[in-house]
Amino acid sequence: MNRIIPVLAVVIGVAGYFWYASTTGGGQTPQQQAQAERLLGAANAQSADAEIDTSGVVEMQLGNPDAPVTVIEYASYTCPHCATFHSGNYKQLKADYIDTGKINFIYREVYFDRFGLWASAIARCAGTPEAFFGITDMLYASQSEWARAGGGDPAAIADELRKIGRLAGLSGDAIESCLTDAEALRTLVAWYQENAAEDGIQSTPSFVIDGRTYNNMAYPEMVRLIDEAAGS
């Protein structure tokens, strides 16, 4: 179970990382590097001070939006326990409750680190909830490979995430646009922080079932809570 920690300072300026990395490959002069660092510093300061409107962030959901019970999963793409849930209990939940329209299922990303934010950017780049969940499945199924690429080297991890995006049918231009959209990335971080505070999320995976927050649990316990909330 991964504990949530403050991450704004970790992920802020992530888009700048991609831009800066792309400009250093050919070798810059010290003056060019200094200019790039000043631009990134200014962007970071601006994002830290500005109020961020999160109302435009799309909830990624499956199932029946009019179902009597809503289940919200809070998870991080870099959380091994979340990958375990998605390889087992989630598949049961999808077959028993989501695909049958018995619940409305919402997935909300948690960001422990920049790698989880990058993965989220790739998944959301797909646009539709169906495509988002398809990429989410890919990310969790291959988490042990991409999240450890190059021994944790950021460039290697980014390249592996790009490969997943391309496998999902995203164009190279779309992938780079999503990874370097500083405003969108900052908005996602602010959105995550608002949600986590509102629902009292302390670890991942966590679940909000009928408005009440629970830590990770065995599938039979989840079934009991859902059925009780539905009055069955």
Image (cartoon, rainbow, N blue to C red):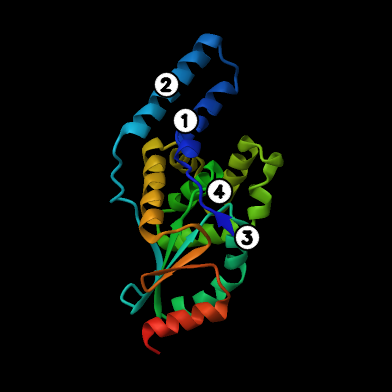
- Alpha carbon distance from label 4 to label 2: 30 Å
Which residue is denoted by mark 2 in the rendering? 39
- Alpha carbon distance from label 4 to label 3: 16 Å
- Measured as percent of width and height from the top left, residue 150 is found at 70, 39
Placement of 199 over or under 98, stated as above or below: above
Q: Quadrant of the N terminus?
A: bottom right
- Mark 2 touches mark 1? (CB < 8 Å): yes
| Secondary element type, mark 4 | helix
- Of residues 11 and 16, the one nearer the viewer is 11
Which residue is denoted by mark 1 in the rendering? 16
- Of residues 194 and 72, the one nearer the viewer is 194
- Alpha carbon distance from label 4 to label 1: 22 Å
Placement of 139 over or under 89, stated as above or below: above
Which residue is denoted by mark 4 in the rendering? 166
Placement of 129 over or under 89, stated as above or below: above
Q: Is residue 63 left or right of residue 78?
A: left
Which residue is denoted by mark 3 in the rendering? 141
| Secondary element type, mark 3 | helix
- Alpha carbon distance from label 3 to label 1: 28 Å
Of pointers 4 and 3, the one earlier in the residue sequence: 3
Quadrant assignment, res 149: top right
- Measured as percent of width and height from the top left, residue 227 is found at 43, 84
